[in-house]
Amino acid sequence: MLKENLDNVLENINKACEKAGRKPEDVTLIAVSKTKPLSDIEELITYGIKEYGENKVQELCDKYEAVSTKVNWHLIGHLQTNKVKYIVDKAYLIHSVDSIHLAQEIEKQAAKKDVACDILIQVNIAHEETKFGIDETNIYEILDTVKDFEHIRVRGLMTIAPFVDNPEDNRGYFRKMHQLLLDIKSKNIDNVDMSILSMGMTNDYMVAIEEGATMVRVGTGIFGERNYNI
Ligand SMILES: *Cc1c(COP(=O)(O)O)cnc(C)c1O
């Protein structure tokens, strides 16, 4: 089942790229493995998948230790400042930086471990009260702080679009994110390279790719439905 699902997702990525005149190699698929067993990850590794997304620090650390091959772990869920110390040297990329306070803590812990930490700024582009992420009008405030940090590199932006039945309803949000990325890029801020745009989940990754996503985070589409009660 995993192989079929994966092939289907990869085919959809190709289709979306073709439609948008983009190259499939410019889009990175992150397999969102939260709640899923290590055996699923090990199987996907044999199909060549090297990028995995987790939304909880503890689960990411456990899987990081247990997996048989080196893969890249993406922290995609909300990060509390008191957990930063567990993750700075394990996360390949932290997608969910949403405050100056959190960025400061990442800088501090990364300095302690003498590592450089790649991060994305999470933007709440639809201004949903239930979602984390900063308002786009506040983004320059964060970037202005981070530009002087020595252990953080801002690689781009991330968003979680609203849950909608029709993915077309999110197109406008994805477009706004891409525009924001280009605006920031044009300002050439120190420490900020804006090469990554992480957006699109099982329901809407094709639309996200058409609008410029360079990373899509797909869970259900690869692993099937999640069961949070186990
Ligand atoms: C769970 C999760 C995903 C994947 O969601 P699916 O709808 O299962 O593809 C993507 N991004 C974040 C931040 C998530 O928490």
Image (cartoon, rainbow, N blue to C red):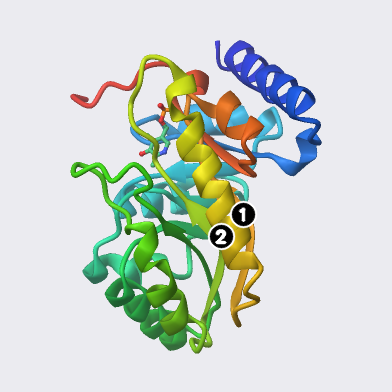
Q: Is residue 101 above or below residue 176?
A: below
Whether disc 1's CB lies below 8 Å from ligand 1 is answered: no
Query: Is residue 92 something that shows in the picture?
Result: no
Which residue matches tag 1?
Answer: 196
Label for residue 156?
A: 2
Query: Is residue 216 something that shows in the picture?
Result: yes
The residue at the point 32 percent across, 78 percent down is: 105
Left or right: where 73 falls relative to 9: left
Percent of width and height locating residue 230: 22, 25
* Amino acid bearing label 1: Ile
* Amino acid bearing label 2: Gly
Per the image, label 1 sits on a secondary structure element best described as strand
Quarter of the picture holding the N terminus: top right
Percent of width and height locating residue 24: 77, 33
The residue at the point 34 percent across, 41 percent down is: 126
Q: Is residue 162 above or below residue 214?
A: above
Dot 2: few (<14), some (14–19), or many (≥20) neighbours within 10 Å? many
- Quadrant in the rendering for residue 154: bottom right
Q: CA distance from mark 1 to mark 2?
A: 5 Å
| View quadrant of ligand 1 | top left
Per the image, label 2 sits on a secondary structure element best described as strand
Left or right: where 115 falls relative to 209: left
